[in-house]
Amino acid sequence: MGGAQSSAKGYGYHVLRVKENSPAHTAGIEPFFDYIVGINGVTLDTESSVFQEQLLFNVDKEVILLIYSTKEQEYREVSLIPNKTWSANSEDGLIGCSIRYCSYESINEHVWHILDIAPDSPAEMAGLVPTTDYVIGTPHAALRSENDFYELIEVYLGKPLRLYVYNADFDVCREVIIVPNHEWGGEGSLGCGVGYGYLHRIPKTNKFKSRDRHFELSWNSSQQPSTTIASAFNLDDTASDNEKHTYSNQIINDDQVSIKSENRSISNGDGSDSIVIVEKEN
């Protein structure tokens, strides 16, 4: 991957949530915008057990992650130390973030810019801020096109709709609950203008521009797991490809010892049975 010269196309682990005071939080990993695309010199361009293996193999040791920010449209390296002592809850994992493997190509295009807001509207009651708020997602569904957002609003008429919203002034994300309806006394079900497209994308903050662009590691493809990693997983080689990948596109906790799907699990071979899927897309 040769540093910042790589095209912003590919796959990685989308960071959905980051626990406060976790190794991921301390390292400055941002939920929603950051994708983990490499670990210790190996790019995660295919879904495999490499990421989990590296975390397990390096407990209490420094690991270097390659991160792509869809907000800044830049790659950066961050270092952190996976450990079991930062949280009393073992389900919080080794680095304290929840992730989902998916594509990050064109993901920064799918945002909805909040424009004018009418008084006493559902948008105002929900605390949306005009001109500086951007809807970037929802836990209810994946938003991959302009119409996905408007169709979601129709589905949730009269019901609480949870939205992930980014504010450009404060450079923070928050969850907003809004109840779309046509009875509030004005136009539309939200009572606000919404912009979509090139002119309504999130502005870059250039927060990483001052960093040294030199990359400490040479990033190589993960087509084959590193032979230096002692295998932490037992895979049944007789299982079909479909069985081996039934956990694809599931949202998983980043770093537990095993991955469970509907009919298959990958464990560390010592009898432990930690479940790492923490949520699903509806």
Image (cartoon, rainbow, N blue to C red):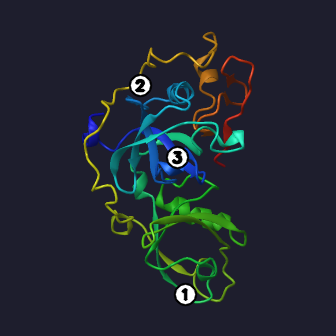
Across and down, in percent, residue 19 comes to 60, 51
Q: Are marks 1 and 2 in contact (CB under 8 Å)?
A: no
Q: CA distance from mark 3 to mark 2?
A: 22 Å
**Relative depth, front residue between 175 and 10:** 175
Give coordinates of residue 192: x percent, y percent: 53, 80
> x and y percent of residue 256 in the render?
64, 33
Say which residue appears at 67% left-offset and 85% top-offset.
Answer: 184
> What is the number of the mark on residue 24?
3
Q: Amino acid at mark 1?
A: Ala
Residue 38 is left or right of residue 15, and the answer is left
Residue under label 2, please give it: 222
Q: Quadrant of the N terminus?
A: top left
To which residue does mark 1 refer? 118
The residue drawn where x is 64% and y is 64% is: 162
**Crowdedness of circle 3 by 10 Å Cα count: few (<14), some, many (20+)?**
many
Residue kind at label 3, given as amino acid type: Ala
Task: Give the mark nearer the N terminus: 1 vs 2.
Answer: 1
